[in-house]
Amino acid sequence: MSLRLRLLLVLLAIYCVGGYTLTRRALEQVRPRYLESIEESLVDSSSLLAALVETGLRDGRVEAEALRRAVTAAQGRAFEARIFTLRKTAVDLRIYVTDATGRVLFDSTGLNEGRDYSKWNDVARTLRGTYGARSTRDVEGDDNTQVIYVAAPIRHEGRIVGVLTTGKPTRGINELVAAARRKLLTSAAVGGVVVLVLLLLVASWVITPLERLTAYARAVRDGRPAPLPPLPGRTLRDLGTAFEEMRDALEGRQHAERYTQALAHEVKAPLAAIRGAAELLDEDMPAEQRKKFMANIRGESARIQQIVDRLLELSSLEARKTLGQAGPVEAVALSAEVTGLMQPAFAASRVALTSGGVDAATLHGERVLLREALVNLLQNALDFSPAGSEVTLRCEAGKGRVTFRVEDRGPGVPDYALARVFERFYSLPRPGSGKKSTGLGLALVREIAHLHGGEAALVNREGGGARAEFWVPI
């Protein structure tokens, strides 16, 4: 499992647990808050109506006829009120009045007059001089039948002579609560999507620099030139700088060891041949034989010089991390230029050289290095091409890159050697002479490709011969 996915899952789990807990807590608090607001309003209503009844007391006796007439008139009113999602068309406020013993003198429903309510909390507590309220369901377990009652004392000369209770059914409130819950769930869902997107962005913001560093480390491992990627934040920049310094230190030591060993190994045979020829020249020999040994010395000296020059060039390329004097290069024009440079060598070996471009494209790079890479590929094809055969150089553009293909009609590459042809100093005997090259030409080609952000490959053609590909991004 990738670090990006792990981080995303952890953040998502934290959000889901936290979001679920907060949303559930909020949903649980919606209805109680509505009921509290109802009870607060009923306190005002009961106190106001109790004061109104107190104005009609006669010798301390509670009279509710005026209240009865007012309630009956209110219940007969026709109206329509839109309260958010609630449609209200009738007065559903319940009112009842009891005397000092708790017997109901007036009930707005007309169903409970004469009953003893002295045991109900709202009446009993109010008659004792404390705050009286209750919540009762007409049908047990059915919240739609729940009614909240709040009572207020009716006083005469400081004595409590009765109780006035107002009650409010919660059926309409339940509709408002359901609407509020739906809105809360919708908001939670939308917020969840937004947070999920933010989590993805945060995960990408955190992981992308680490992925860049990983790609950079792999490029260093594979020996490909790669610039240190841009990294946000001081900590990541310090980490990137440490990577770069470690790379420089390791490459410096490995570079020196590798090239010292390679140079010692490759010049050992030519030096042995030169020393042997020099020792033989001390003896008397025919002029013709002396001339032959002198030619061997010059040939092996030239080989050593070629190895040293190629090693220096390859070492210089490997030490570089970015292109130097880079600019736009026309692919077709570059192919034509390289073909012109190599035409005399091909003509001398009686091998035909043709070039062409399917697409005209411009790439960004160092023209000198690109030309050298193509020259090396053509020279390698020429070395393995028999007289009378043909070598083709073509360039194609597609998928964001330019590909140069060199095809020959030679013997091809043995299967055991396909994976090693780009290794330093690995070389195969030439068909005509049996001699090997320095083994640095294809290594140089690959290094130039890597420096341009591309790649090089060599495969066998189905019809015989080999095909070398060299591509760089446009």
Image: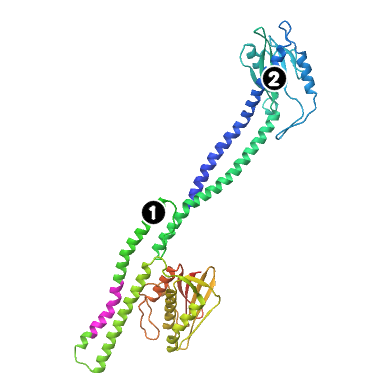
Q: To which residue does mark 2 refer?
A: 166
Residue 156, by quadrant, is top right
Q: Closest to the observer: 410 or 54? A: 54
Q: Is residue 355 visible?
A: yes
Q: Of the residues under marks 1 and 2, which one precedes in the sequence? A: 2
Report the Cα–Cα distance between label 1 and label 2: 72 Å
Residue 97, by quadrant, is top right
User: Residue 153: x percent and y percent?
Assistant: 66, 13
Q: To which residue does mark 1 refer?
A: 239
Q: Say which residue appears at 72% left-offset and 7% top-offset.
A: 61
Residue 133: numbered disc: none
User: Residue 255: x percent and y percent?
Assistant: 32, 67
Looking at the rendered structure, the kind of residue marked 1 is Leu
User: Residue 36: x percent and y percent?
Assistant: 62, 26
Q: Closest to the observer: 347 or 53? A: 53
Left or right: residue 352 versus residue 75 is left
Callout 1 environment at 10 Å: few (<14), some (14 to 19), or many (20+)?
A: some
Q: Is residue 464 visible?
A: no
Q: Which residues are magenta?
A: 262-277
SS state under label 2: strand
